[in-house]
Image (spheres, rainbow, N blue to C red):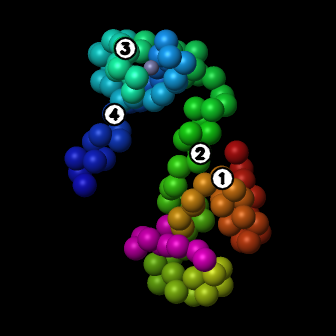
Amino acid sequence: MIKLVGVLSMPSYVATCKCGKTFRYLSTISKRNEPTECDCGLMANRDVEAELAPGPMIKLVTENERWSVSMGVPVSQIAKFKKLYPGSTYDSKGRLLIKNRKDKLRQCKDRDMYEIS
Ligand SMILES: [Zn+2]
């Protein structure tokens, strides 16, 4: 588990390959500008513009499942909130599982909460 956190905290960059594929890869800061291998077998170069651009890459991040602390509940009240909001999943720390952006908006609406950002 500690090892996994270490891997996830490694900076990630975006590369675009000659085959047209744009993908995220992990690298140390010192090696971030070295070409990285694409699924197609070619070497892809870092694409700084794609890293900074909003759009597909941002979507890739926000569509991931994550645990929300802000919509979480005290551990002692998990059972109560599960009854109140059927279909909600809380972890052992009381954080709410957000499956994707659509799910987040629905969960916010159920709770009369609004997105700040
Ligand atoms: Zn490729």
Q: Which mark lies nearer to you, 2 or 3?
A: 3
Residue 76 point in image, percent of width and height: 47, 84
Q: Is mark 4 on a helix, strand or loop?
A: loop
Q: Residue at x 58, y 48 (%)?
A: 63
Q: What is the quadrant of residue 82 in the picture?
A: bottom right
Q: Earlier in the sequence, mark 4 or mark 3?
A: 4
**Which region is colored magenta?**
87-95
Residue 98 point in image, percent of width and height: 57, 60
* Cα distance in 3D space between marks 2 and 4: 18 Å
The amino acid on which the numbered mark 3 sits, given as a three-letter code, is Met
The amino acid on which the numbered mark 4 sits, given as a three-letter code, is Met
Q: Specify whether residue 93 is painted magenta.
A: yes
The amino acid on which the numbered mark 2 sits, given as a three-letter code, is Thr
Near mark 2 (Cα within 10 A), the count class, few <14, some 14-19 or many ≥20, is few
* Cα distance in 3D space between marks 1 and 2: 6 Å
Q: Specify whether residue 112 is painted magenta.
A: no
The verdict on label 3 being within 8 Å of ligand 1 is: no
* Cα distance in 3D space between marks 4 and 1: 24 Å
Q: Name the residue under label 3.
A: 43
Is residue 69 shown to the viewer in this render?
no
Q: Which mark lies nearer to you, 2 or 4?
A: 2
| 2 to 20, vertically: above or below | below
Q: Mark 2 points at which residue?
A: 62
Q: Mark 1 points at which residue?
A: 101
Query: Which label number is shown at residue 63?
Result: none
Tally of numbered discs:
4
Q: Earlier in the sequence, mark 2 or mark 4?
A: 4
